[in-house]
């Protein structure tokens, strides 16, 4: 392992990061079988959360992918964090392996941290979702305000495997951890019941599910609803040029494949929803540009400590050269510091600036 | 020029092509200031048709781009050919510089070829459009069947400039050439009138216009209607994976920018049309795959000579490794040979095959 780490650094697939009081090695790309987001924290390896393959069809997909029964868990639309204890601190890493000052600031409000005292080796894998999160523009319908944590896996330090389902459930129950909704244990023969679950999730605006095989290999597969894809388009059309264009074509394909399998009719309503998702988002961008000479989105997050809010702004500012972060407010209000900031989408801003002033495009 | 040609060949930007009875040098990519599609035919250079920049806004766009009055011509949605005489033959080249056996076969039906006898140096630049063309799936509403030619420029051998507008019009009139519709000579101050023209074209399902400056530099700029973009999406959604994903995001941006400038309301009707364009095309692909295990589109073209039909099939077959061409019929019917063939979109076919059988995708 040490050799691979050295090689990764040489090849610039891993780099030393220094943030808040920590210095650590972060895999910025997949390297051999080591996933992006893996970090070396002191002498402890925190493995990256692995890539999970997606099926576009339930019927053949489940039959094809699973050899044993599988659990179904809800897939929540938020950001993925790994939370662990290190030298007396609780640390949280994003999927990419960055330290997340927002999660670190808020985690104690949602977790019984005794779990780390009594199990110092564990790493909790959770989704943080809700309108008060600083990264993701979408929010599940069942998180009404601020944020919530949803635990979906537990790992151990220096190990890349997840704890078995039963062991994970025991810990979740023992410490009363906030967890994703689970639907039970199924086989591919339960296809009708599974389709009904997904049909209902789609109606409720939920994102989808992760299937987890009840076996040694603990294989995972994900599947998302039509509405989740529609929601992604609705939210991101405004900053279309900030995302790879496949982002949109992939979602269009998934949306239609879901409809086709679930037997959802091609109704006027559905046509309208999709057209509206694209058109309104782009109109919104044009209108904002004409008024404010930028295309941006506002975020509002709550912090316990001012220093964590400032650290988040610092981190976001250096995260992408295509996004400018403007802090517009940081004030104590009751028990919290309220941070308001704007992400200015520079590609979309630049493009609209060019063409609205009459510029030429060669495409 | 000779030096540049040699360098282009060395750098694999130009290559020798051999097709029908001709052997010639073709620029397969832009190289320095030589556009893709430029060819060396014997000792004659046929310059490639240049790239034309696009504006997304009429108001500022025309003011910004033009120093002199400009002509407005209709932009027709077909394929671009350059037609000239060479050693007693009429030759036609596609935009990419390939010899087009279909155009060569049919051109005499639409042109008074005396123009080449009396002006052996000229190159006619035309769009060929209609449901009977072998390349483009769309067809303008004003071409009811088969094909039509629409001349929009005239060039000379060995020269990269176009003939001046007046000279071009004289030749078109003298030889009664089929030409694109012209709307007259305007300045940016005529913006209201120009917007009305485009608004009407949009209602009629026409593609758009090319502005051509009445000056020495003969600058050109193009602009397309909202409906043209919608039409592109409607026709190509079925083979979404065959096109670069920017194809779709570019058209979405253009569509909304057109609407916004023309003050077109965001109506239910428009939302529906856009959603339908994507959803129906993709459903169509899934349904065809389930029935026929392929995603394809049928073309029917008329030829005078059987050998030209066979040459077209040969050319199309070698044009892209992502498209398989299947000839399904070639029969004499009245005065013509009727060629029917299918283009099988292999990317879309492969993708649907993989996922409909339950395959996994890491995206």
Image (spheres, coloured by chain):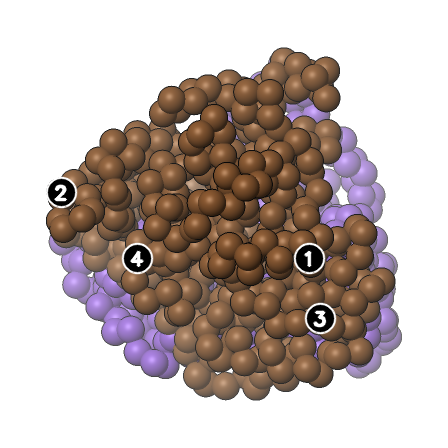
Chain colours: A brown, B purple
Residue A301 against residue A169 in the figure, above or below: above
Question: At x 43% / y 51%, what residue is drawn?
Answer: A111
Chain ID, mark 4: A
Secondary structure at badge 1 equals helix
Chain letter for mark 1: A
Instruction: State how far apart marks 1 and 2 are (Cα).
Output: 43 Å
Compared across the picture, whether B223 is left or right of B68 comes to: right
Q: Which x, y percent locates residue B201?
A: 35, 70
**Secondary structure of residue under mark 4:** loop
Q: Which residue is mark 1?
A: A165
Q: How much space separates mark 4 and mark 2, taking CA atoms?
A: 17 Å
Would you call the spot at circle 1 few (<14 residues within 10 Å), some (14-19), or many (20 or more)? some
Question: Going from the N terminus, do you reach mark 3 or mark 2 first?
Answer: 3
Place of residue A213 in the rendered image (x, y in percent of width and height, measured from the top left): 75, 60
Within 10 Å of disc 2 (Cα), the crowding (few <14, some 14-19, many 20+) is few
Q: Nearer the viewer, residue A360 or A13?
A: A13
A15, above or below A329, in the image? above
Mark 1 or 2, nearer chain start: 1
Residue B88 in the figure: left or right of residue A135:
right
Q: Nearer the viewer, mark 1 or mark 4?
A: 1
Q: Residue at x 26, y 44 (%)?
A: A303
Dot 1 or dot 3: first in sequence order is 1
Can you identify the residue that label 2 sits on?
Answer: A331
Circle number at residue A146:
4
Q: Position of residue B82 (x, y in %)?
A: 59, 47
Residues at circles 3 and 4 in contact by the CB criterion of under 8 Å: no
Mark 3 against mark 4, which lies toward the viewer?
3
Residues at badges 1 and 4 in contact (C-beta under 8 Å)?
no
Residue A185's label in the rendered image is 3
Q: Are discs 4 and 2 both within one chain?
A: yes
| Distance in Å between CA atoms under marks 3 and 4 | 32 Å
């Amino acid at each position: 392992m040490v050799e691979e780490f050295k090689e990764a650094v040489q090849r610039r697939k891993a780099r030393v990061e220094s943030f808040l009081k920590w210095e650590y090695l972060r895999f910025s790309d997949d390297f051999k079988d080591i996933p992006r987001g893996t970090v070396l924290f002191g002498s402890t390896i925190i493995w990256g959360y692995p890539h999970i393959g997606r099926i576009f069809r339930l019927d053949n997909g489940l039959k094809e992918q699973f050899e044993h029964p599988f659990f179904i868990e809800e897939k929540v639309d938020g950001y993925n964090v790994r939370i662990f204890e290190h030298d007396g601190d609780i640390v949280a890493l994003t999927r990419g392996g960055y330290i997340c000052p927002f999660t670190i600031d808020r985690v104690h409000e949602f977790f019984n941290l005794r779990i780390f005292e009594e199990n110092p080796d564990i790493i909790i894998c959770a989704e943080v979702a809700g309108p008060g999160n600083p990264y993701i523009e979408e929010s599940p319908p069942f998180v009404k305000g601020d944020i919530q944590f949803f635990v979906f896996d537990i790992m151990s330090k220096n190990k890349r495997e997840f704890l078995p389902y039963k062991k994970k459930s025991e810990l979740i129950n023992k410490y009363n951890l906030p967890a994703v909704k689970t639907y039970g244990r199924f086989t591919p023969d339960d296809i009708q019941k599974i389709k009904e679950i997904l049909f209902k999730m789609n109606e409720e605006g939920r994102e989808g599910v992760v299937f987890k095989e009840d076996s040694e290999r603990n294989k995972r597969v994900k599947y998302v609803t039509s509405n989740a894809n529609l929601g992604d388009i609705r939210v991101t059309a405004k900053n279309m040029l900030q995302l790879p264009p496949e982002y949109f074509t992939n979602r269009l394909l998934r949306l239609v494949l879901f409809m086709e399998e679930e037997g959802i009719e091609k109704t006027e309503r559905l046509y309208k929803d999709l057209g509206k998702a694209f058109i309104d988002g782009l109109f919104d961008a044009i209108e904002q540009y004409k008024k404010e000479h930028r295309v941006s989105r506002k975020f509002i997050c709550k912090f316990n400590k001012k220093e964590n809010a400032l650290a988040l702004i610092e981190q976001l500012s250096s995260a992408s050269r295509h996004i400018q972060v403007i802090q517009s407010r940081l004030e104590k209000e009751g028990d919290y510091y309220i941070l308001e900031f704007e992400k200015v989408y520079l590609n979309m801003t630049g493009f609209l600036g060019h063409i609205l002033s009459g510029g030429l495009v060669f495409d």
